Amino acid sequence: METYHSNMARRWVLSLQREGRIIRQGNHNKKVHIFRYVTESTFDSYMWQLIENKQKFISQIMTSKAPVRSCEDVDEAALSYAEVKALATGNPAVKEKMALDVDVAKLKLLKANHMNNQYRLEDDIVRNFPQQIAKLTEIIDSYKADIAHFSEHKITDPEQFSMEISGKVFTEKKEAGMALLAVCKDIKSVDAAMDIGSYQGFNMRIQFDSWSKEFILSVKHESVAKVRLGADALGNITRINNLLESYPEKLAEAEQRLETVQEQMTNAKEEVGKPFPKEEELNQKLERLSELNALLNMDEREDTETEQSESKEKEERPARGSIHEKLQIYKEKSQRESETGKETRKRDFGLE
């Protein structure tokens, strides 16, 4: 029976493969028609169920939405004799069992997702959110200190420009820009950062990024901010000024992220500890599925008892063999009756 079931599954898979050869790029036919015939009270419904389960099995592997860690191939499924009989006779219990199998598997997957989410929330509350809050608080404090420091050392008069590069102070933007480009040419070590000077109270470092093939300039007081340098001398000075002017915007972004993380932590504390919302439904379907399995197993036991009873009747039934066998049975029966008669006559004559 299991071999027949396996062969049926293979024929269905081959049928789907043939459809794949029809509906594909390179087919010269503009239109194709595919007909599927399903016969009631046959294995067709089970085969379609098998294909559906196989697709769900593949979807679990190909998508990241379902947080499953293991999957079982549906090819290992086998029908019991009772299920085969029920399918052949159109027993609604098997159809209900198949639907319950799918529903229970889906609910178990949702419950596993719920439990994983609970564990993640607990981990976020205990470790992740506090770490993020502490880091963002430190960044915010650094930005505030840098904004205050920049306010004290900011060049308000364009005629009072000053930038120190490699120990030399430049009072002209163009000369300072050319000095930056010269420093970039002198950098020979890839990905190695080098201190080059200071500007408006911030230390400056240059590093060559081998991935983007660009020079990165960093400015630092409490926090570190970076900007990519170009080939234009004056343009690089403008980029540095824009970077320092962007600190208030960076501070606002950090404060917004901190507010978001704090809100997430509050929501996580409200959600953690909540039970699975469909726990009662899962238990009811598991109970009904157990009843159906027991019913199908009972049918199988009844079939086995019937077969054993029929086998016993055949053993007790008189043999229907050849004429020689019938004569032998008649001879043995006559001999037994003759011996019984002799013993009876002996008792009548008082010989015993």
Image (spheres, rainbow, N blue to C red):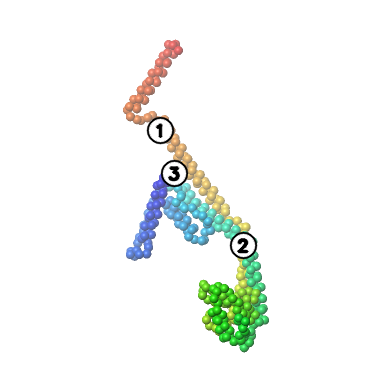
**Alpha carbon distance from label 3 to label 2:** 51 Å
Give the x, y percent position of residue 69: 53, 56
Numbered circle sitting on residue 213? none
Type of amino acid under label 3: Tyr
Numbered circle sitting on residue 314? 1
Residue located 60% across and 81% down the image: 165
- Closer to the chain start, of discs 3 and 2, is 3
- Closer to the chain start, of discs 2 and 1, is 2
Front-lying residue, 240 or 103: 240
Give the structural element (helix, strand or loop) at label 3.
Answer: helix
Type of amino acid under label 1: Lys
Front-lying residue, 7 or 209: 209
Give the number of the mark in front: 3 or 2: 2
Observer able to see residue 91: no
Numbered circle sitting on residue 124? 2
Residue located 65% across and 80% down the image: 201
Number of residue marks: 3
Image quarter in which the C terminus is found: top left
- Closer to the chain start, of discs 1 and 3, is 3
Numbered circle sitting on residue 81? 3
